[in-house]
Amino acid sequence: MKKPLAERGKLIVVSGPSGVGKSSLIRLCMEMRNDLCFSVSVTTRAMRTGEADGEDYFFIDDARFEQMVEDGELLEHAQYVGHSYGTPRSFVEKKQAEGINVVLDIEVQGAAQVHAMQKDAVMIFVAAPSFEELENRLRSRGTESDESVRMRLLRARQECEEATIYDYLIINDDLKTAAEELSAIITASHCRFADRESVLH
Ligand code: ADP
Ligand code: 5GP
């Protein structure tokens, strides 16, 4: 029996409505395992209190964003509630080549672009137990204006309708249970037959 070929890191795509708990879930899962890194996106939205440039996002202006798109520096990009968001390509490619899994917290249009490009990307959608609970979380986080909450909830309904390309659905009711599910999905993705079958021949 041969050892499996050295594996390329996987793209772990986590999507779901704003306020559902994606950041909290990813943070907890990253504390539970040491084979993940987080892809820090670029965005043109304003920094929230408590966020750090280079940690939560790279905060850039419209001109810089357009330049990055033109220069092919983004793996995917999309508009969300009046602002642009995108995934820097070079970081993701470097980490994947090193065999490290890269977690992307991105909305559904960007996720569809990634899915079209990398068929073995692990596609995960996160939902709240109810829309009422989603609204509670979004409001209690205290980061959005009433208008932003309204737009994000509208968008949430659309995103749930458009969530057709995902392999897994995590219902984030209890955060720890949800993080354990996310970790289990990542573990299972490494046991895929196609990734391991070289050991059989
Ligand atoms: P997202 O990244 O999807 O926008 P956040 O991780 O910022 O969401 O979470 C939104 C709010 O919901 C935060 O105040 C967070 O503490 C809270 N939250 C996250 N998961 C849960 C959960 N399972 N139960 C209750 N509150 C949660
Ligand atoms: P927020 O403004 O709440 O941080 O993020 C709003 C939405 O943008 C969330 O659904 C989040 O997943 C998504 N998002 C964050 N970064 C990216 C990115 O690089 N690309 C895409 N397509 N969506 C992103």
Image (cartoon, grey):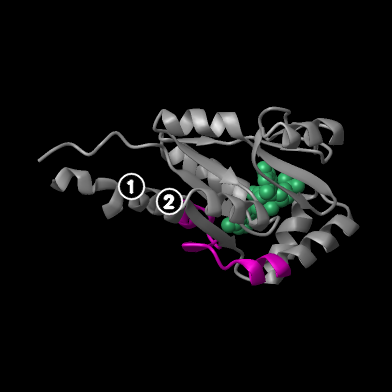
5 vs 21: above or below: above
Closest to the observer: 66 or 45? 66
* Residue 128 at x, y percent in the picture: 61, 65
* Residue 105 at x, y percent in the picture: 61, 46
191 vs 95: above or below: below
Q: Which residue is mark 1?
A: 190
Closest to the observer: 163 or 56? 163
Q: Which residues are magenta?
A: 157-180
Q: Amino acid at mark 1?
A: His
Residue 102 in sight here: yes
Q: Earlier in the sequence, mark 2 or mark 1?
A: 2
Q: Amino acid at mark 2?
A: Asp
| Mark identifier at residue 68 | none
Q: Which residue is mark 2?
A: 120
**Total marks in image:** 2
**Left or right placement of residue 39 versus residue 191 in this view:** right
- Tell me the crowding category of disc 1: few under 14, some 14 to 19, or many 20 or more residues within 10 angstroms, Cα based: some
Look at discs 2 and 1 and give the one toward the viewer: 2
Q: Is residue 65 magenta?
A: no
Query: In the picture, residue 88 is in which quadrant?
Result: top right
Which residue corresponds to the image point at 65% horizontal and 51% vertical from the top-left?
110
Closest to the observer: 134 or 123? 123
Query: Tag 2's secondary structure?
Result: loop
74 vs 176: above or below: above
